Amino acid sequence: QLPVVESGGGLVQPGGSLRLTCVVSGLALDDYAIAWFRQAPGKEREGVACVSPGTIAAVADSVEGRFTVSRASTKNTVYLQMNDLENEDTAVYYCAAEKQYYCSDWDLNRPSIFDFWGQGTQVTVSS
């Protein structure tokens, strides 16, 4: 089993909401920063949001005010709440983990530093 596993993707209409879940196993979640990335067809992987073990979060400008990242350490789980979804949010969403105690916009621009990745979950926004 992968150390990080995403779920919660699906088909939603514009303006709708989804909550993605990332379950972490085999890793001490309190030692890891967790990030969400997404990749649309023909586009590069884009950092969406991340949260540090101290629950300090960073969110990309493209989703600011619409997406929220949070973590529930007792459940080894990180959530990405996505509201007011737009067609442009359609992508495969990935959860990634890196052993560090901080997370910022800098990390969202550098997916290569994250050691552990999930298999991805498809989010499709369409009417």
Image: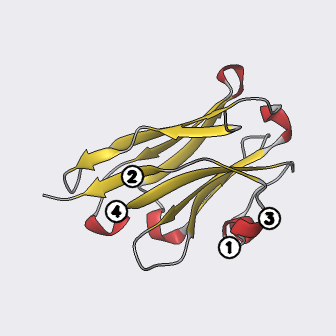
Q: Quadrant of residue 73?
A: top right
Tell me the CA gap for discs 4 and 2: 8 Å
Q: Of residues 116 and 62, which is closer to you in this image?
A: 116
Give the spatial CA distance, label 3 vs label 4.
24 Å
Closest to the observer, 51 or 40: 40
Give the x, y percent position of residue 81.
45, 43
| Label 4: element kind | loop
Q: Amino acid at mark 3?
A: Ile
Query: What's the CA distance linking mark 2 and mark 1?
Result: 21 Å
Q: Are marks 2 and 3 in contact (CB under 8 Å)?
A: no
| Whole-number angstrom distance, CA of label 2 to CA of label 3 | 23 Å
> Please, what is the three-letter code of the amino acid marked with disc 1?
Asn
Residue that carries the numbered disc 2 in the rendered image: 122
Q: Earlier in the sequence, mark 4 or mark 1?
A: 4
**Looking at the image, which residue is at 72% across and 29% down?**
25
Where is mark 1, residue-wise? 109
In this rendering, which labeled residue sits more in front, label 2 or label 1? 2
Q: Nearer the viewer, residue 34 or 114?
A: 114
Q: Secondary structure at mark 1?
A: loop
Give the Cα distance between marks 1 and 3: 10 Å
Image location of residue 24, percent across then percent down: 68, 33
Residue 14 percent coordinates (x, y): 21, 57
Q: Image point 65% across, 21% down: which residue?
A: 75
Which sits earlier in the primary sequence, circle 2 or circle 1?
1
What is the basis of the colouring in this image? secondary structure
Q: Is residue 15 above or below residue 23?
A: below
- Which residue corresponds to mark 4? 90
Nearest to N terminus: mark 3 or mark 4: 4
Residue with the mark numbered 3: 113
